[in-house]
Image (cartoon, rainbow, N blue to C red):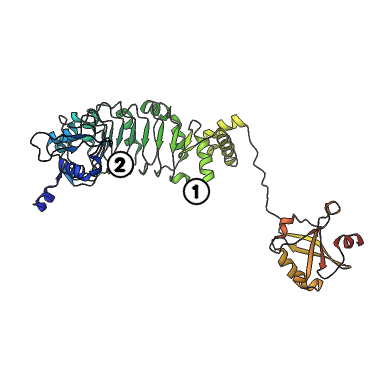
Amino acid sequence: MESSDEEEGRTFVQVVSEKYNPENFPYCRGNGMGVVVLSSPQGSPIKDRLNLPSVLVLDGCGISKAGDKAEVATFCAHVVELDLSHNQLQDWGEICTIVSNIPNLDFLNLSMNPLSGIELEPGLAEVFSRVRRLVLINTRVTWDTVHTLTRQTPELEELFLCLNDYAQVAESPVPCPSLRLLQITDNQLQEWSEVRKFGPMYPCLDTLVLSNNRLSSVEEDTPQDTLQRLFPNLRSINLNNSGLNRWEDIERLNFFPKLEEVRLMGIPLLQPYTNKERRSLTVAQLPSVTVLNGSVVTEGEREDAERFFIRHYLDCSEETLPQRYHVLVSKYGQLAPLAEVDLRPPCTATLEVRWGERTEALSLRLEQTVGELKKELRALVGLPANGMRLYYIARELGSALGPEEMKYGSRALHSYMIQDGDEILVVPKTKSRTISSTSSDS
């Protein structure tokens, strides 16, 4: 009998009965847990089942059918969100039976169910009228079915159509003015001529997520007028990992009249640049965008980016300069290149090395340490490295500050800010005379 059930699949009612049977919740029977227990319809083989929670997750349960609709209605009176992803539902009639008996359903996830090529009859789609968020990821549903659903969901606000292998978009004769968010990532959309169809279909679209489509351009004959008309309310667009490879496409994003948030990570155009250059050049191109790649653009960052943009194009010929360059030059003026300041310490310096009554000028590598210098001076001064003390005397400040003992063998010479003409005094450790007296004798 069990093998027969597995072949036919499990019903929604069976799964609910097993998952939410009171026998599985022994601590919920007493008072104080806030769990509602309702009686099943008359004649039901299982009595006194739990009333389901408002968020019901039944993913990966092998569901292929609805089961008794009266039982669905009894259990799901308070259900608001339903996750049926990764099941075996391949009949819209069964799905509609479930949905029609959940009167308060707001969110429905049908992802990963095998619905490819299975059309939804318009008469059945009316049961989705209360749904505001619909997830159809990797279902391979046809555009006809999508349009049937959007026509019957007057309150639909969010639609997820990822991983459905769409290379084209079939236009709908009836718009869906309620839709605010369309996520259609990881499909095969490459041409802007397909993407632009979303404008008339979803005229109030606020957020368009197109990441992981190889969209090659944002191409319009008259981009300013057309994009304003097609997407008058678009506030956010995600073009991560698209195929955009021209700055002209980035410039055209300015023609979306309300656009303020953009994601452009992983596009070919920006690959040759460093992370800082990518962000600066993009921020400078998009003056109305306040959030780029998830990070807020501050006023200070924008000014720095726009100045960087001007200097980036200083050496370009007039005919290759982008229009944005001229706009920014009129704002900041013609900027001079930034002076290149090398803050690295000098590599060598010529110092006077003095020991006893002798003095010799030496060119020293300043990246070496005090310990290494002592080894280098052994032959010159005739002392072992551990038998000498070194004192640094700055030529300009020596008289004011006096000698500074170079105590630490691991300290690099450049950290003393050594300059040409400074002095290093070598004193034997066994010698009793003080440095001050040695210095005064000189």
- Residue 305: give x, y in percent of width and height: 56, 38
Can you identify the residue that label 1 sits on? 272
Q: Nearer the viewer, residue 37 or 65?
A: 37
Quadrant of image for the C terminus: bottom right
In this rendering, the label closer to the viewer, 2 or 1: 2
Amino acid type shown at disc 1: Pro
Residue 364 visible in the current orientation: yes
> Helix, strand, or loop for circle 1?
loop
Quadrant of the rendered structure where residue 240 is? top left
Measuring from the top left, give residue 405's x and y in whole percent. Answer: 78, 60
Which residue position holds label 2? 162
Question: Which residue type does callout 2 highlight?
Answer: Cys
State which quadrant residue 329 falls in: top right
At 89% across and 68% down in the image, what residue appears? 357
Q: At 23% across and 29% down in the image, what residue appears?
A: 104
Relative horizontal placement of residue 310, taking residue 47 as reference (left or right): right
Q: Position of residue 180 (x, y in %)?
A: 34, 30
CB within 8 Å, label 2 to label 1: no
Of all residues, the one furthest to the right in this rendering is: 441
Quadrant housing residue 232: top left
